[in-house]
Amino acid sequence: MADLNKPVIVLVRPQLGENIGKAARAMLNFGLTELRLVAPRDGWPNPSAGPAASGADSVLANAKVYATTAEAVADCAHVHATTVRKRGVTKPVIGPDEAGRLVQTLPGRHAILFGPERSGLETDDVALARNILTVPINPEFASLNLAQAVILIAHEWSRTARALAGGDTVLVQPTVEETLPPAPQVELDGLIAHLTRMLEPREYFFPEGRAEATRRTLRGVLTKPGWNHLEVRTLRGILTTLERDPDRSQT
């Protein structure tokens, strides 16, 4: 299990400590150990989490807390958002089996986002992701609790990892020659913020009623290619050059 490429599990604004504990238990059942919490409603640590974890104390002890989803995935090259709805953003839609394959075949850190128990991920959370991860489910009763959702994804990751490795063989991170992994989310966010800053004074986000939708669409366009850090750096350099005053640059 140690050599498998393990995704980071990110619980976004979880509400109940019991559910965090049950999610940690589900993770450890299949060898996942890195848990990140975004603004847990009742704070952290939560005394209700430990008993619900039923022995998965190491996962809870090492859990990290972040103020925003963007901060929680800043070091991850691939972000997958679990949701049954697209929520106004256009993203590739994949299932758990495809997600498991991507985690094992695409180099770089992977984060899987799970939304709060009552409402699920918000549109701005989904906008951070490269794709939407959804599970085929009965349309007449499409209700999973948080731990169920985590265990479904963790199980499929484990199954796919072993299938790709061949039986019980430990899977080694594949080497992709001459291919760099996508840039971490924090670098992509910097590029998006840079371009947004340049577009705002030119009224690109006008009218105001469509501004947020336009921002999400722009983020989606810039997120899809999966640029590596050198490509992001090149694009930032281009934007910086375009910002310069042509007259001053010749003096």
Image (cartoon, rainbow, N blue to C red):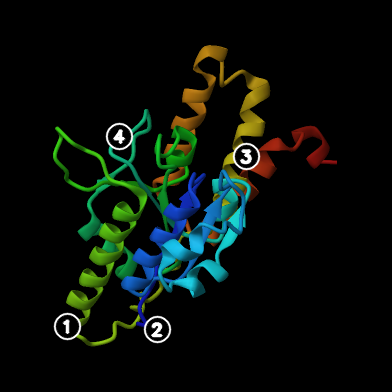
> Is 127 on the left or on the right of 161, as rendered?
right
Quadrant containing the C terminus in the rendered view: top right
**CA–CA distance between discs 1 and 2?**
16 Å
Residue at which label 3 appears: 193
**CA–CA distance between discs 2 and 3?**
37 Å
Give residue 242's position: percent from left, percent from top.
Answer: 66, 38
| Label placed on residue 2 | 2
Give residue 112's position: percent from left, percent from top.
Answer: 40, 55
Amino acid on which the number 2 mark rests in the picture: Ala
Badge 3: few (under 14), some or many (20 or more) residues near its Cα, within 10 Å? few
Let me know if residue 185 appears in the view.
Answer: no
Q: Earlier in the sequence, mark 2 or mark 3?
A: 2
Residue, x 40% and y 49% (percent of image)?
114
Question: Do the residues under discs 1 and 2 have CB atoms within 8 angstroms?
Answer: no
**CA–CA distance between discs 4 and 1?**
34 Å
Amino acid on which the number 1 mark rests in the picture: Gly
Badge 4: few (under 14), some or many (20 or more) residues near its Cα, within 10 Å? some
Question: Do the residues under discs 4 and 2 have CB atoms within 8 angstroms?
Answer: no
> Is 236 on the left or on the right of 126, as rendered?
right
Q: Which of 176 and 210 is in front in this view?
A: 210
Give residue 182's position: percent from left, percent from top.
Answer: 46, 60
| Label placed on residue 108 | none
Badge 1: few (under 14), some or many (20 or more) residues near its Cα, within 10 Å? few
Quarter of the view holding residue 100: bottom left
Amino acid on which the number 4 mark rests in the picture: Arg
Give residue 34's position: percent from left, percent from top.
Answer: 48, 68
Residue at which label 4 appears: 85
